[in-house]
Amino acid sequence: ILTILTFFVWSYTTLASDTTIVFRKVNYADLFELAKKENKGVMLYFHFNGCGACVTMEKTAFKDKKVFEFYNSNFINFEINTLKGEGLEINKLYNVKLHPTFLFFDNKGNELHKMVGVFSPEEFYKQANNALLSNKNLTNYKRLYNLGNRQPDFLFDYTYMLRDANELDSLLINEYLNTQTESELSKEKNIKFIYEFVINRGKVCISFNS
């Protein structure tokens, strides 16, 4: 009987991992020890029942083969329903208010990266990959900014990172624009930047390419 039960559990886990991101059914208190044991990072998915944006991610990005293979191979994925059960208590540690929110950690509990909202499968994969790269994640960009990095390319990338983490303010937008000459502002990448962050204030309802 034990052998049969083990087979069914293994089959279910394998089947799930072949179709979507697998969220571990473990206690939150054991999460980072498990990550150390498996030598993986940790991804926390904050959601609640009835969250339309969360359902969109679950039906699209979560089910993309490249996405779920990468997440299942590199992270202990853990979902937190912020309005229900244990999730209410866990969220007191993180104070997440917007959903979905995705937080990425190393297995020691150090936050590496953050994403808020709906993302395409390509972007969701790219940002998870960046979370694991010490020079590409949001935490490192914050460190470099606080150390005084104001290079134009750095400020440009940092603006988009903070937008995706829902932490952007107008100071950084202006800092980047002030590094550009009049002729540089006419380049397509800067026209798009102005369209997204000045005209639409980071909330693009009509795409730049429309």
Image (spheres, helix red, strand yellow):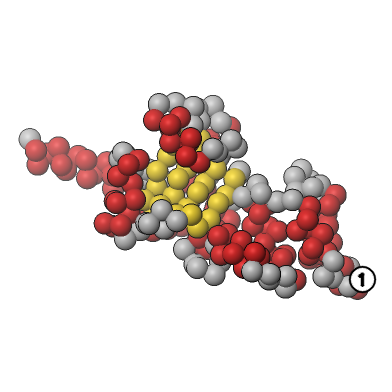
The answer to which of 123 and 170 lies nearer the viewer is 170
Identity of the residue furthest to the right in this view = 182
Tell me the kind of residue under disc 1: Glu
> Compared with residue 64, is residue 180 higher up or lower down, i.e. above or below?
below
On screen, residue 8 versus residue 54, left or right, reads left
Which element type, helix, strand or loop, lies under badge 1?
Answer: helix
Residue at x 50%, y 49% (from the top left corner): 103
> Compared with residue 143, is residue 20 higher up or lower down, i.e. above or below?
above
On screen, residue 168 versus residue 51, left or right, reads right
Residue receiving disc 1: 182
On screen, residue 126 versus residue 87, left or right, reads right
Q: Position of residue 162 (x, y in %)?
A: 66, 54
Indicate the quadrant where residue 205 lies: top right
The answer to which of 117 and 93 lies nearer the viewer is 93
Residue at x 47%, y 63% (from the top left corner): 132
Residue at x 58%, y 32% (from the top left corner): 52
Q: Position of residue 4 (x, y in %)?
A: 12, 39
